[in-house]
Image (cartoon, rainbow, N blue to C red):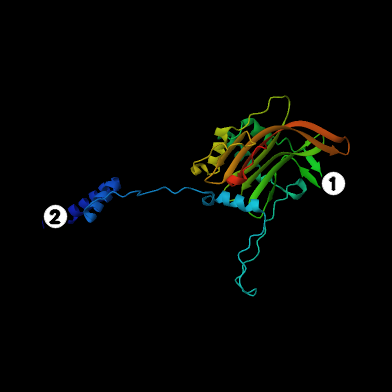
Amino acid sequence: MSLWQHPRWMAGLCAAAVLVCAAAPAVFLTAVDAAVLGRSETVKDAYTAPTPSGEDYYVLRQLTARQEKQSNLAPVPETEEDPNRPALKMYIGAQNSLENMTNGYDYQETVNTTLQNLADGGVIDPQWAAWATDWGDATQAYVGYDGAYYPLDVPYYATDSLGFVTLKRFALEQESLYTAFSMTMDSRTGVVTQLWISAPRQGDEPPPTPGEEALLAFADRAGLENLGDWAKPENSPYPNALYSRNGQALITALVSPYEYSGWTNAAGTVTSQRWFLSLSLQPFSEEDLPQLVP
């Protein structure tokens, strides 16, 4: 038996060839192409990267559907008796008052982690995350008009028919109930689409407002960084905003003072000077973008 016919030698040769190909697949494939084709040719515009659009992103498709808030019915078939006629689908929004929401004790860690991640990622200042997650203690509670007891050391949640979850923390100001924070997330991806946080106002200096880098970080956390054209929109009423023409999407951030006004049986009308942070991702066509009024 010759050396070329020896089975062990042949097995070793094959193994070595496989290792060489695995180590340099591009070189291997180029060599094969050259051997098969025998020639090379320059091709004009051989590859053009596709331009991404809002339709390419699940969360933007969902936000667009929620924004429309209307029935989504396929074209009516020619005959009313057609058994394949699709059913009418209606958007049902989430009820956001405390009495209509569900105790979200199991989601407290989700809220804490999500807000901390936004702070760690540079989207919001850590102060805002701390205010939002100041759960207090188990003695804090609200008693509704119907006598129902609502502990205030837990979040409450509601879900709409598209799968968006709104989580809120409620608190008392001189025994009057107010919303301490509200956060809307897509339940399938965990992407935060809206955030609102209330903070006490103890001076004229506002808490930090998310700037351009923060809004880019917000887009990144939503998986939208590959849209690639986020820029400040012209003539926008929002001092802090980014718009993507490719995605037809607008991100805005605003910090502003406001006066909370409530009512209690004991004290009557109560007021409180506070700040709020509003951060949102919304679908917007370019022609419908909010504009400053001259």
In the image, 81 versus 113, the foreground residue is 81
How far apart are the two marked residues, 1 and 2, measured between alpha carbons? Answer: 94 Å
Residue 212 visible somewhere in the drawing = yes
Name the quarter where the C terminus is drawn: top right
Q: Badge 2, how many Cα within 10 Å: few under 14, some, many 20+?
A: few
Q: Which residue is mark 1?
A: 145
Residue at the spot of label 2: 4
Name the residue type under label 2. Answer: Trp
Which-is-in-front pick, marks 1 and 2?
1
- Which element type, helix, strand or loop, lies under badge 2? helix
Q: Residue at x 65, y 33 (%)?
A: 128
Quarter of the picture holding the N terminus: bottom left
Amino acid marked by disc 1: Tyr
What x and y, as percent, mark residue 216? 54, 37
Q: Quadrant of residue 192?
A: top right
* 42 sits to left or right of 274: left
Q: Name the residue: 25% across, 53% down.
A: 33
Most extreme residue toward the front is 294
